């Protein structure tokens, strides 16, 4: 039990735990102190100064986010001095900010705009500084647009890139009025170690960092009668989208989303969960094949641990940071790219369509997927496999533009052929989900029995701990897998690249002896992706995760290999996992990248 | 030759340091508490400008429980118009090194650093030589203390103690949130005493002569002597060690050129005093009963009637605009607004009342900026604008 201390906030005495910051103490007692540079995911910076409060007896004001309460403190959060100063600070921020709100992508979801509106800053007394500055707008990345004229130097992106991701693509350069957030040697975001994860976008309070949106391109495609526009939706979108459209966090809107996509005019609405199930078939088989090559064939070239390859942020990270470990990656493409390759082959054939006329769109909780779709490796269908990637946020914008009353939609089911999924595909959206889904299938493949966890729930790989571990012992395998008798499959799960770094270092030092590791670039996995609704914070991630696992529990089928459409695609098209056709369409290799 | 000075000269700091080995050996054989008491009773306050009681600073670090502690000498002398630390380090380096080692003994630190201003690179070879000799002696008397030089890179803000730690840790030199304070969490998160060069040199004096000799100088709240860097419109620029508490009138009488219009006390972050206030202004730390008393890190800039106060302020603001670290809003944007604002008023693009808006802005900066830099921009701005308003407008 923490020691309790007595303080007073706006004249009301309260008892709080010692070492609580003034900001938290105020929030606990129902007093809202505005913030900008503060974010629950990040360390305290205390640099925007918006959260200043008055402590009686002190001449200077104090940043509430950065100051712990002390016994007897008499705190005023709305005194004349506080209000005047806070107003000044907002005015100062606005004078340096390109407040071109109606033309801003973040219009309506900008924390600075909200503050300006709350404090009714109606005049512009201070001199506008924007015209005096030589701002750059970096649009070279297929994922991220960085507009320095909108930046308020809160450094949330810098802290995100350092603390959550350990990438440090964004940093602070210069000082005084020249101080800015930039990259190594002020190169374009596309030319540095940036993994396109989009966490900076998700943490940016203004429009300084936004995704490159492809909304108009998709509208154009839909309107083009010569095009057959199909769309896939990633597992995590269905538990995030609602937040943009009137629901609270953690509400599953799968059926409504499908209904909305149909109304938007997509010719077919299918599910990335289907290719998530397919990934499990391919990746699970790859894992078992690698084990066999190692244990039976004693192949010295086979690499362990095998790492998952679903997260494009993680892929770019390993290309930059651990290029000598690229052989450890599963050769499987991500579910998005598997879907893309199949859309213009399998689907085209089954529907008797010219793949040339197919426009393949994907809805992703992710900005790195935009980069991934743009990769030269991703043209195995003979065309660009995925044409446009939209984030959850962009889809919400389209739904609003189309005038769809989302909350009143009736549930609709995905279209057939690549629209069926199992609970295993759904949990891809949460950290640990790929691992859990893979274990459910691989274990059964090897032993003929369910994985030995209560109700298929492999709880050790669930939850928000940065690095999770699980061991599954294989007993009484089927005859063809007899060599696995007694083998303890050691697995790890890492989410957030800073945790990926920890695991990779433990592999490099020889400290760990995992066989299989799931890596996800974003904290919480895809449900906390850079393309998800803003805000995303620990509480919201937890709620989205609960929704994902609830969706899994409610599915009649919860193991990838039970998916009837998966059974069908192997029968009609792919033959078997790791077949020649799968190799051609569903697998790939990545190449090292420099850090500079 | 004797000269009759209006202000009493003191000669402690630059007095020969030949006896540093004796002072060191003697001091490290005294109990830490005794040395702390000596400092406390001397009432020595930090000579960098902020004036925190030195004895208390050492005491807090001594009480902090940690196996690793540090002593840091802040030689990032960057305040415009001050150049005393440079002289101390080149003329009596052993006093500073000895004081650092004694501090190490008092608080339980084995490592000391001198954070040397980037532009003082030329001091480094001689200083290094002194350190080698000093460490050799420490070894000889079996006293475990080492000193290293850390070179700054030219940022004014790194003289701010927590920005200095960040800089030493290899990070961007930006001030930290306080609390925690350096005495419990400083360099590398360890308890750290960080003192100005001159402060350390004064502790040498105190350990040598005892607290009383020091205390007997100066006035209430402002004990001892202090080095002053005198510059500007003066026939005798230079460094002078004088008693604290002198009146500015006497100072101008002695150092002025007969046409002194104003004196900037404490550099760009200090206050400008116009002629009409010389008689009521004393130089020292603010106390309950002292009336107008201005602290200074030692910078005394004299301006005669040929000087435009607009240009002076413009120059200061230009300095702050560039030297703000840029992390906190009031300082980064505030400095730009002040600079652009006075220019706009001068050009007639903004009316004279805009100066009042800017004065209110400096008040906000003083209340809300994260560190001393942003907080003290108000000092020069308000004292210049309030006293020379016409010069700002016409």
Image (tube, rainbow, N blue to C red):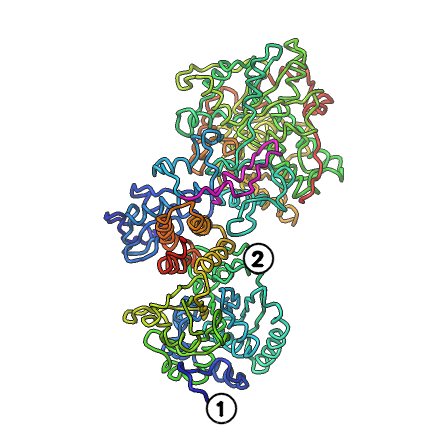
Q: In which quarter of the view is residue A437 placed? A: top right
> How far across and down, in percent of the image, does residue A16 sit?
30, 49
Residue at the spot of label 2? B170
Q: Which residues are magenta?
A: A126-154
Q: Is residue B214 positioned above or below B337 on the image?
A: below
Q: Chain of mark 2?
A: B
Residue B77: % across, % down: 51, 67
Q: Give residue A420's mark.
A: none
Residue receiving disc 1 = B1
In the current view of this chain or complex, which residue is farthest to the top? A352
Residue A471: x and y in percent read: 57, 39
Front one among A181 and B239 = B239
Q: Position of residue A237 (x, y in %)?
A: 50, 26
Q: Camera-side residue: A431 or B231?
A: B231
Residue B259 visible from this viewpoint: yes
Q: Looking at the image, is mark 2 or mark 1 nearer the viewer?
A: 1
Q: Earlier in the sequence, mark 2 or mark 1?
A: 1
Q: Looking at the image, can residue A284 be seen? A: no
């Amino acid at each position: 039990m923490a020691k309790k201390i007595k303080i007073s906030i706006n004249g009301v005495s309260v008892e709080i735990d010692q070492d609580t910051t003034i900001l938290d103490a105020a929030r606990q007692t129902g007093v809202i102190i505005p913030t900008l540079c503060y974010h629950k995911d990040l360390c305290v910076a205390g640099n925007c100064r918006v959260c200043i409060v008055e402590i009686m007896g002190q001449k200077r004001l104090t940043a509430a986010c950065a100051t712990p309460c002390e016994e007897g403190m008499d705190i005023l959060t709305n005194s004349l001095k506080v209000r005047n100063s806070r107003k000044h600070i907002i005015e100062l921020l606005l004078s340096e900010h390109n407040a071109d709100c109606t033309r801003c992508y973040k219009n309506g979801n900008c924390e600075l705009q909200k503050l300006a509106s709350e404090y009714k800053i109606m005049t512009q007394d201070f001199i506008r500084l924007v015209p005096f500055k030589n701002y750059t707008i970096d649009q070279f990345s297929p994922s991220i647009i960085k507009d320095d004229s909108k930046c308020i130097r809160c450094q949330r992106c810098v802290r995100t890139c350092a603390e959550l991701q350990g990438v440090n693509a964004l940093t602070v350069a210069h000082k005084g009025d020249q101080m800015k957030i930039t990259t190594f040697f002020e190169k374009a975001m596309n030319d540095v170690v940036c993994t396109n994860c989009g966490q900076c976008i998700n943490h940016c309070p203004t429009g300084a960092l936004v995704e490159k949106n492809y909304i108009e391109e998709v509208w154009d495609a839909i309107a083009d009668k010569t095009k057959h526009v199909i769309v896939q939706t990633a597992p995590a979108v269905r538990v995030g989208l609602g937040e943009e459209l009137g629901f609270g966090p953690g509400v599953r809107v799968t059926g409504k989303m499908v209904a909305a996509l149909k109304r938007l005019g997509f010719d077919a609405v299918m599910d990335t969960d289907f290719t998530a199930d397919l990934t499990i078939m391919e990746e699970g088989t790859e894992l078992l094949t690698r084990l066999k090559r190692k244990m039976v064939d004693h192949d010295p070239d086979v690499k362990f641990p095998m790492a998952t390859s679903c997260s494009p942020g993680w892929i770019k990270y390993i290309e930059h940071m651990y290029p000598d470990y690229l052989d450890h990656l599963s050769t499987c493409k991500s579910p998005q790219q598997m879907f893309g390759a199949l859309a213009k082959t399998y689907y085209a054939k089954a529907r008797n369509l010219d793949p040339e006329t197919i426009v393949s769109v994907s809805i992703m909780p992710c900005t790195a997927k935009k980069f991934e779709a743009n990769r030269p490796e991703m043209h195995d269908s003979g065309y660009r496999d995925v044409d446009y990637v939209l984030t959850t946020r962009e889809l919400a914008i389209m739904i609003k533009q189309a005038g769809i009353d989302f909350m009143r939609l009736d549930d609709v089911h995905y279209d057939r052929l690549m629209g069926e999924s199992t609970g295993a595909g759904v949990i891809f959206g949460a950290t640990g989900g790929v691992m859990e889904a893979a274990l459910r299938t691989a274990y059964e493949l090897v032993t003929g029995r369910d994985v030995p966890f209560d109700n298929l729930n492999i709880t050790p790989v669930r939850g928000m701990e940065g690095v999770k571990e699980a061991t599954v012992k294989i007993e009484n395998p089927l005859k063809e897998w007899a060599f696995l008798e007694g083998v303890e499959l050691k697995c790890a799960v890492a989410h957030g690249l800073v945790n990926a770094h920890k695991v990779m270092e433990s592999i490099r030092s020889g400290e760990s002896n995992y066989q299989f590791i799931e890596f996800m670039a974003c904290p919480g996995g895809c449900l906390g992706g850079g393309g998800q609704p803003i805000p995303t914070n620990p509480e919201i991630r937890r709620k989205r995760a609960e929704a994902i696992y609830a969706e899994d529990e409610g599915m009649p089928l919860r193991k990838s290999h039970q998916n009837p459409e998966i059974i069908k695609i192997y029968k009609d098209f792919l033959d078997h996992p790791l077949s020649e056709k799968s190799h051609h369409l569903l697998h790939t290799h990545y190449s090292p990248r420099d850090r500079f | 030759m004797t000269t009759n000075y209006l202000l009493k000269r003191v000669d402690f700091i630059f007095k020969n340091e030949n006896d540093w080995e004796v002072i060191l050996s003697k001091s490290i054989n005294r109990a830490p508490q005794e040395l702390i008491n000596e400092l406390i009773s001397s009432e020595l306050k930090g000579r960098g400008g902020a004036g925190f009681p030195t004895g208390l600073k050492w005491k807090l670090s001594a009480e902090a429980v940690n196996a690793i502690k540090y002593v840091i000498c802040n030689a990032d002398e960057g305040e415009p118009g001050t150049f005393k630390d440079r002289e101390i380090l080149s003329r009596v380096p052993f006093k500073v090194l000895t004081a650092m080692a004694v501090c190490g003994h008092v608080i339980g630190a084995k490592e000391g650093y001198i954070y040397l201003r980037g532009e003082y690179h030329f001091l480094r070879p001689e200083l290094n030589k002194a350190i080698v000799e000093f460490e050799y002696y420490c070894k000889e008397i079996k006293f475990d203390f080492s000193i290293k030089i850390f070179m700054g890179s030219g940022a004014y803000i790194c003289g701010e103690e927590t920005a200095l730690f960040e800089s030493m840790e290899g990070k961007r030199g930006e001030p930290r949130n306080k609390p925690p304070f350096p005495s419990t969490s400083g360099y590398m998160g360890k308890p750290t005493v960080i003192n100005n060069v001159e402060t350390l040199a004064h502790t040498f004096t105190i350990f040598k002569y005892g607290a009383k000799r020091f205390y007997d100088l100066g006035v209430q709240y402002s004990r001892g002597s202090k080095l002053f860097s005198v510059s500007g419109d003066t026939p005798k620029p230079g460094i002078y060690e004088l008693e604290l508490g002198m009146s500015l009138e006497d100072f101008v009488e002695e150092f002025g050129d007969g046409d002194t219009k104003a004196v900037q006390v404490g550099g760009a972050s200090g206050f400008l005093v116009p002629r009409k206030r010389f008689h009521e202004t004393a130089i020292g730390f603010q106390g309950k009963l002292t009336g107008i008393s201005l602290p200074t890190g030692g910078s005394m800039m004299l301006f005669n009637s040929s000087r435009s106060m607009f240009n002076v302020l413009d120059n200061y603001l230009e300095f702050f605009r560039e030297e703000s670290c840029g992390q906190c809003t009031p300082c980064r944007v505030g400095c730009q607004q002040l600079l652009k604002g006075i220019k706009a008023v001068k050009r007639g693009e903004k009316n004279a009342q805009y100066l009042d808006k800017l004065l209110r802005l400096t008040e906000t900066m003083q209340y809300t900026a994260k560190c001393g830099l942003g907080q003290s921009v108000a000092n020069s701005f308000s004292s210049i604008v309030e006293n020379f308003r016409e010069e700002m407008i016409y």
